[in-house]
Amino acid sequence: MSILGIDPGIGVTGFAVLDESPSGVLTFNRSGQVKTNAKAPFSERLKLIFDHILEVIETDHPTAVALEDTFFGKNVNSALKLGQARGAAILAAAFCNLPVFDYTPTAVKLAVVGHGAANKDQVQQMVARFLELPKILSSDHESDAAAVAICHAHSARFQKQIDQADHQMLRGMPRRRR
């Protein structure tokens, strides 16, 4: 499985591509940022995010896309713009028929650091450690994107185990007579 993790933002959208081996080992492939010009029309900024994420998908061929869910702060306008940036990334994934998974910031921090109130520096340090990188990624947007991908890998692995257990349990149950 190859996972494209995305930390959406209208100013900067971070992305990271991780590959997972059949044994569950995650390997860092690459990461980067989509930076938009604050003075450009909003529609052009969204198109840039869409185009760049589409390019990453076409280059790296991920099998799943994981995004950090929108955090609602006090500024409703910022939350709406963030939601639209997420929409551009989701649309790029849907355009390529890829499944999309959402994770809350708390779930991502919990999966990577071990507690949901971790700060950006802790996330960056743990992502570098977890992926055995020689140094932390160049931006917190890239680290957050990698953290989302790590969270999805853990979640998908756990869900697969649940599905297998359910399947085994159902196979062992006697059939009902009609």
Image (spheres, rainbow, N blue to C red):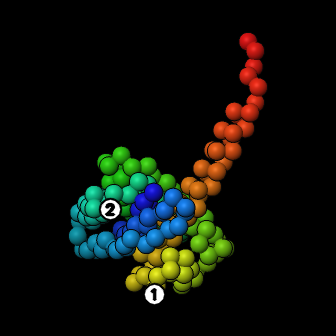
- Give the residue number, with chain letter if any, for mark 1: 135
Name of the residue lying farthest toward the bottom? 135
| Quadrant including the C terminus | top right
The quadrant in which residue 52 appears is: bottom left
Residue type pointed to by label 2:
Asp
Residue 98 placed where, x, y %? 39, 49
Q: Nearer the viewer, residue 118 or 171?
A: 171
In this view of the protein, can residue 50 be seen by the observer? no
Q: Residues within 10 Å of mark 1 (few under 14, many from 20)?
A: few
- What residue is at 32 percent from the left and 49 percent from the top? 96
- What residue is at 53 percent from the left and 67 percent from the top? 25
- What residue is at 28 percent from the left and 57 percent from the top? 58
- What residue is at 41 percent from the left and 54 percent from the top? 63
Residue type pointed to by label 1:
Lys
Residue 84 placed where, x, y %? 38, 58
Which sits earlier in the primary sequence, circle 2 or circle 1?
2
Q: Nearer the viewer, residue 31 or 106?
A: 31
Q: Is residue 49 left or right of residue 5?
A: left
Q: CA distance from mark 2 to mark 1?
A: 22 Å
The quadrant in which residue 135 appears is: bottom left
- Give the residue number, with chain letter if any, for mark 2: 60
Residue 27 placed where, x, y %? 46, 70
| Quadrant including the N terminus | bottom left
Whether pointer 2 and pointer 1 mark residues with C-beta atoms closer than 8 Å, the reply is no
